[in-house]
Image (cartoon, rainbow, N blue to C red):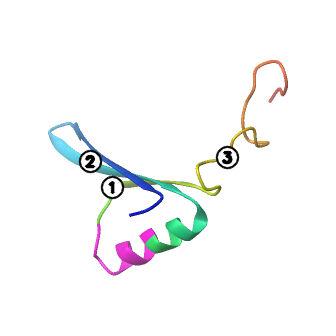
Amino acid sequence: MEGVKETTIIAFDREIKIAIVSGLKNADNVVKKIKAREIHYDFVEVMACPGGCFWCRATICEGRWKI
């Protein structure tokens, strides 16, 4: 799928399927496929911006913003 990176890791003798989704349109498509049981993930990370947000307000940059 476009805008989706997948990987599987082994932890505690179990396979954990992970997806990283870039862009809300792609996230909507992934959610629809999960609900339709076409795909399965144990963990899904969604980045709102296509390609991920770079230098957005949520980005922590040492020396610029302090939390």
* Farthest bottom residue in view: 36
Instruction: Return the disc, 1 or 3, that comes first in the chain's sequence.
Output: 1
Q: Answer with left or right where residue 43 lies relative to residue 60.
A: left
- CA distance separating discs 1 and 3: 23 Å
Label 3 crowding class (10 Å Cα cut-off): few <14, some 14-19, many 20+? some
Identify the residue under disc 2: 16
Identify the residue under disc 3: 53
Q: Position of residue 37 (x, y in %)?
A: 29, 76
Looking at the rendered image, the quarter that the N terminus falls into is bottom left
Closest to the observer, 22 or 61? 22
Is residue 51 highlighted in magenta? Answer: no
At 65% across and 55% down in the image, what residue appears?
A: 49
Instruction: Report which quarter residue 4 is drawn in.
Output: bottom left
Q: Position of residue 44 (x, y in %)?
A: 43, 55
Closest to the observer, 11 or 38? 38
**Residue range of the region highlighted in magenta in the rendering:** 30-39
- CA distance separating discs 2 and 3: 26 Å
Cβ atoms under marks 2 and 1 closer than 8 Å: yes
SS of the residue at dot 2? strand
